[in-house]
Structure formats: structure tokens, C-alpha cells
Amino acid sequence: MHSATPSPKLDRTSADGTLLGLLTAGFYALFTLLPGSNTLMVSWPWAFLWQVSLALPILWLLWQVGFKPLRQLALGSGLDWVAALMVVGLIVSTLAADFPQQARWYTWVALGGLAALYALNGWLNSPRRLLSLLQFQGGLALAFIALSLGLWISQIYLPELARLNTLRQYGVDLAFSFQFTSLRNWQPIGHQNYVAGYLVLVLPLLAALAWVSKGWQRWLWLAGTGLGLVNLYTTSSRGGWLALMGLAVGGFAIALLLSPLPRRVLWSIGAVGLGGMLIAIATNDRLSGVIRALLRGDVGGGELVYRLITNAVGWNMGIDRPLTGQGLGSAPLVYQQYRPYWAGREAELQYQLHSTPAQLWGELGIWGILVPIALVGVLSFQTFRWVRRSPATDQTLPPVLVWSLLGGLLAYGILSLTDYQVDNLCIAGAMLIYLAVLARTWQPQLSTQAASPGRINRWLVGLGLGTTLAMTLWLVPIHRAWSLSSDGFVALQRGDLDSFVRRLEQAHTLAPWEPYYAHQLGWNLGNLSYQSPDPGQSQALRRAGIEWFQRANAVAPYLEFGHSNLGWLLIGENQPQEATAAFAESSRLIPAKPGVFFGLGFSRLLAGNTDQAVEAMALEIVRNPMLISSSVWQVGQFAALAGPVLDRVETITTDLIADAPAGALKGYLHQVRGGTRWWQGDLAQANEDWQIGGSAASLALLALAQNQPVDLESLPPGSPEQLALQAWFTPAERRDLLAQAWVAQPEDLPQLDEVLPPEDILNELETTMNQSPSLEVWLKQNAPSWQPRSQRLGFGIISRHIDGPQPSDYLPRIENVPMVKFFDTVFPEAIYLPELDSALQPYRDELLNQVSSPG
């Protein structure tokens, strides 16, 4: 008598849910190779598609739970306990989060990743599938490398060479430089560090596949490995190269202990590898610059400080709530609340903390520490056991492939100390594949026998489907709001304001906890209020903008953007007290932000408190001294305020100089006080300051003002100030030299039209210089001005929505063009000078306490 039970082959095919697995793999490949994938994930409709890609592994796992006993799905080797610890931590953190909707959403994403791990583990029930999965990952990595290099060459490298060739026509001879962020290879994910993170994960796998393959396949994997190293070079990622060096050291140590190859061969391979890395570092100006700076003991400024600040934010977030953290997804919303005031203008706002430990500690508290430690501990212990079992006799997978997976995880673990990247599907997916393969490799045997699921399986499937349905219903209005807002922004581009407002209002109603919709309504309506020629319509738009900014600030109270721009709209409504409150809040969040203390001072001036207005504007100038050269001090009520403000600047800088030790702070203060005195015509005292802390351009201007000869060779060769002074001394070549001075600034602007001087500005610079009897008169009285808007770069990325326009501040900047473009070292911009902000903070606190006091 034959059993009615289906054949094992049919059972296995049905139980594995292969179709759902293939769909999951398809979405994984899509978001690995999609150009700009990390950015597109926060735009419509891609946001919906990647949410679908996370729902698929959940359904895939539930399918397998319905057909297989749970023991066939268990990871084993202690990894299930790590997964359980992770789930508990996510639940606890989410329940305690101040921003529960964001925490719930990100927790669901994390659970989707965990479901993918278990679904993969259930599908990997034969050695053939283990190898096939790794070959699939390797093939995807080859496609990624080819796409990345192709896009970088065609869209970044060749256009930059064309730009540099055009600049040579202006007499500016520059070389291609990886110092500029925009020239590093960020294709196709969206950031060079993400590309490097993916590469250090997959390069060991490609090398191992070359080792175990034969014939043309070996050459294919070898070529992929070589191109991958070239690809890593083009990212110029310091974290990536640090990870590669860590991988090389770890791999060499393991080889010395376990490899059957002769020691002489191993040492030769190590020497070649070391030589290759040294050549790569020496030929990359960014990497070699880091080495030179470290050898000099120079660790100040730049991206090292950037990460110091973001790590400090993560520490402050976690220490405030060590048992629960702030909740997943909270970093961009609370970042400025926990950002230290000494950070100055560096790292003003981020959506991630550029360090995985800092991110996990800040958002999950102690759970973000326990889970990674437990995972590393389990992986280390199981690796030790596997080595003791003599992996050469293990028929599950060639040992070199297992070592490649461990090596990739080690390399990425090193890089993760300097960045947070697990929100990239390609990186998270690769790590999940590695963990699933390792879990199956460490199991005593692979189960291929068909078995019936238990009763608990039906309960788990029901619970999983119910939870998935509940989360889907919760997500529906969120995605509907996203879709409506996308339509609204399209309407705004067409000039259909009513449709824009209606759709964004609907989006806000559906997802009122998202500050993005209220911010966009507030900013766009406020921006249009400045453009409308109709006073009645302008007022209506401004009042609507105020209302929406107030709603946004209620939802996201720790974002300086909303408070600062609300303050300017309130000034337009002649509400100085309310504007004071808004500017005071933005000053507490980012005290060094240009314009926040100026706005505070303006609001106090309108309120009739001149003393507080003078103090606020003086504090603004000490931190951002270029404001001294602005023609705003010649306009209306500011003209009467200019003298007292500059006197207060001198008093503050004098007091700070008396207490400052020798070093960068003292030099900066002498430069600022000397600039204040020079601008007011006190050349003798300016000379006293600038002899101590003056820049070369300052001393040259002072010499000219005193009718003394100027040594142009003392200025940096080819610098804007040297070329501008040459233009003054050489009228026949004045226009060409001014154009060269304009394009000589080493700014990260790869777009040619943003580098070349506007024709009307160039004409005005030449004309006003021709009409000026002295350079000092040109700079102080005749200099052309412009009114640029401060762009909120990265606003969409940080807000996790990029469908709408990029806002710019309402701050009425009036800049002295030649001072800003040619002589910026006279009034220096201190991006990061913690001693300065620490010295200024007592002055700021005292003023903020005064303006916050009743009456």
C-alpha cells in the first residue's frame, strides 16, 4: 500500500517557497545595481518598492514556517539567541521612543532583515545551494563593480577632465583631486563610503571564488577581484582602505597559522600586497594626505573631527537613555539636541552618526551594544570550533569560501567603526547571505528530509500574517501621503499653488508625525510671500507659512531649520517677541550657525531693546566676522547700530585675548580684532593685532593702506588674494586677473557654470575697481554686493524625503563680493575651533537667559 504523502521532491520544492525567494533576490539585485539607490529609496515610488522588497522575505519565511518543522529553520550555533536578544531590544526601545512612529517603521525594517536571514537559512538545505548562492552574490558583485567603474568614468572622471581643461583657459592649472567629495566614486549606491563598504564585503568572496574555480571562471573572478580593488581606489574611502589593511593583516595571520603553503611563499605574497597598498596610498592625494597629517600629529579639522562630533552625539543620545536608547530612526530628529556647542559649524545636522557603534548605542541604548557583542562572540566561538573540526574534511563548503565570508565580515566590521551603512539593502543583504551560509556550514548536517510542521507552526503563521497585515494597514496612509506629496511637488513646479497646498495638507493629515510635509508647506508659502507683489497676498502667504512652521516645530522641536526661518517670517509680521523666542531656540541648538544671533539681535532691535540687539550682533560677528564687510550696516536702522556693535566686538575679543593661551584661538581673535580696527580705519592698532595673528592678505592690505610696498610673493601662489592684488596693480590685465582670481578658489564645485564668474559680476568688479582711487576705497565703499541665499544642502536626504525642492534660508544676506571671493582670510571663517565656541558660550548663555526672562 502506497502512502498518499507527496514525493519528497515535491514537498521540498513546495516547502522552500522558491518563487518568493526568487522575487526577493530580484529586488535585492535591483537595489544593488540601481544608480543612486540609497537616495532613490527616499523618493516616490521607490520608497514603496523597497518596502515591498522587505515584505517579501517575511512572506517567504512564513511560507516555510507553514511547511517545515521549526528545527529546519533554526540558525543554530547560538545565533537564535542573538536574534531573540535583538527582537527584545527592538521592542523595548520602540515602546520607550519619543518618536514612536519612526521607531515602529525602522523596527519593522529590521525585522524584515531578520526574516530574510531565517528564510535564507531554511532554503539553504543542500551544499549545492550554498555554493550557488555564493556564486550568485559573486556575480552580482561583478556587475556592481563594472557598473560602478563605468558610471564613475563616464559621469565623474571624464567631465572633470573637461572642466579642468576649460579652467586652464583662465590661467588656472589644477589637477584631478580626490580631495573633493564629488570626484570620489559614489556610484551606484550614492556615497563613496557605501561603495567601499560593499566592496570590502565582496572582494574576499571574489578572490575565494577564483581560488576554487577552474578555467575561464577562475579568470573571470580574478578580473573581478582586480577591478574591485581599482574600484575601491576610486572611492578614496579611508575607512575602506583601513578595512582592507585590517583584512590583509588578519588574513596573513590566519595563513601563517593554518595554510599549508611554505612560509617563504606567504611572506612573498604579504610583501607584494603591502607594496601594492603603499603604491595605492602614495598615488592617492587624499589617502597620502591623511598619512602626512598623522605623521605631523595634525588630527584637527576635516572628517576626523566630523566623526568625533557625530560620535559625541551618539554617546550623548545613549547616555541620556542607556536602557532603551532614543529609538530607531530618531537620529536626524534629536541630533541637534545632543550636538555639543563646541562643534562650531562642523557636522551641523546628520541623518546617521557615521559610526555603527555610536548609532546603535544612541538609538537602542544597551541593546545596541549587547547584540553586536553577542554576535561577534558567537561567530568567533563557532569559527574556533569549526577550525578544530578540521575544515579540510568538511564537505559542506570549501574552507577558503568560509574564510572569505569571515574575512568580508571582519573587513566590514572595521569599516563600520567609521560609518553606518546597514540601511543600504545591498550591504545588509550581503551580510545576511554570509550569516545564513555560515549558519548552515556550522550545522552538524543539512536536513533534506521532508517532515510535517507542528501545530505551533500554524499559530506562528497566523501571528505573522496578522502582524504583517497590521503593519501593512499602518503603512498604507504613510505611502499614500508620500504619493500625494510627490504629486503636490509636481504641481508646484507647474505653478499650481492651490493643488500643491491641497495635496501637502492631505499628506500632513495622513502622516502628521512626519515634519517634512509641514516644513515644505511652511517654507514654500513663506518663500512665495517674499516674491508676491500684492501686499495682501504676501501677508496671507506669510501667515500660512508661520502656521505650518509652528506645526513642524511641534512635531520636530529639535531642528534649527524650522525655528530660524519661522523667526524671519515672524519679523515680517512685526511680531518681535515671538521672533525672539524662535531665534533663541535656534541659537541654543546651533549657536555658531551664521545668522541665528543676527536674527536674534534684529528681533531685539525691533522690540526696542538696543543693548540686547548689540550683544547678539556682536556675538554673531565674533563667530562669523565677514559680516563686518557687509553693506547691511549702511541700511536704515542698522547704520546707527554699526558703531556700538563693532565697539562691542572689540571689547569681547579683547577680553577673550586676555584669557586665551597662545595658539589657534589667540591668533583668530587677533585676526578678528585687527580686521575690526582696519575696517574702521584704525591702522596702527590693526597693525598691532595683525603682526601677531594676521594673515598674509591682511598684512598686504594694511601695507597698501599705509602706502607701503607690497610683496606679492609673500602671498600663496595663484591664490585669489594674490591674483586680485595683481589685478589692482596691472590695469591692462585687470579683467583676466579678476576672472582667474574668481576660479582659483579650491571649492568642491564640479559644475563648470558654478565655477566661472558671472559676466555681470565680473563687469561690476572691473568697473568699480577702475573707479576707485585706492584698493581700500574699493573694498570698503565701492565694492559690489550681492544677496545669495544660504542653501539647505542635503535637506531632503536628512529628512528622508527628496521629492520636494531644496529650501534656502530667508536670512537677508548682503555680502561684499570681493571680500568674500578674494580676501576671505581677512575675516576668517572658523568652521571648527572648539576653544572659540567654548569661550563664547558663557556670553551666549547670559544673553539667552536675558531674552528668555519675562519683561
Image (tube, grey):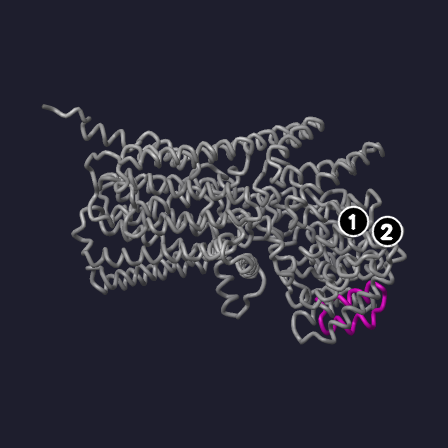
Question: Counting other residues with Cα less than 10 Å from the Cα at mark 2, is it few (<14), some (14-19), or many (20 or more)?
Answer: some
> Marks 2 and 1, Cα distance to the nearest angstrom?
10 Å
Write the start and end of the magenta stretch as one range.
Answer: 672-696
Q: Name the one closer to the observer, 815 or 335.
A: 335
The answer to which quarter of the image holds residue 25 is top left
Q: Name the one closer to the observer, 632 or 715.
A: 632
Residue 191 lies, in percent from the top left, at 50, 46
x 27%, y 49%: residue: 401
Q: Secondary structure at mark 2?
A: helix
Q: Is residue 731 left or right of residue 80?
A: right
Residue 394 lies, in percent from the top left, at 18, 50
Q: Quadrant of the C terminus?
A: bottom right
User: Which badge, 2 or 1, is on the more N-terminal residue?
Assistant: 1
Residue 666 lies, in percent from the top left, at 70, 72
Q: Quadrant of the N terminus?
A: top left
Q: Is residue 360 left or right of residue 634?
A: left
Residue 150 lies, in percent from the top left, at 44, 40
Q: Name the one closer to the observer, 436 or 675.
A: 436
Q: Name the one closer to the observer, 616 or 724.
A: 616
Please give the label number shown on residue 579.
Answer: 1
**Tag 2: amino acid:** Leu
Q: From this viewpoint, which residue is outermost toward the left?
A: 1
Q: Secondary structure at mark 1?
A: helix
Report the predominant secondary structure element of the magenta stretch.
helix
Total count of labels: 2
Question: Counting other residues with Cα less than 10 Å from the Cα at mark 1, is it few (<14), some (14-19), or many (20 or more)?
Answer: many
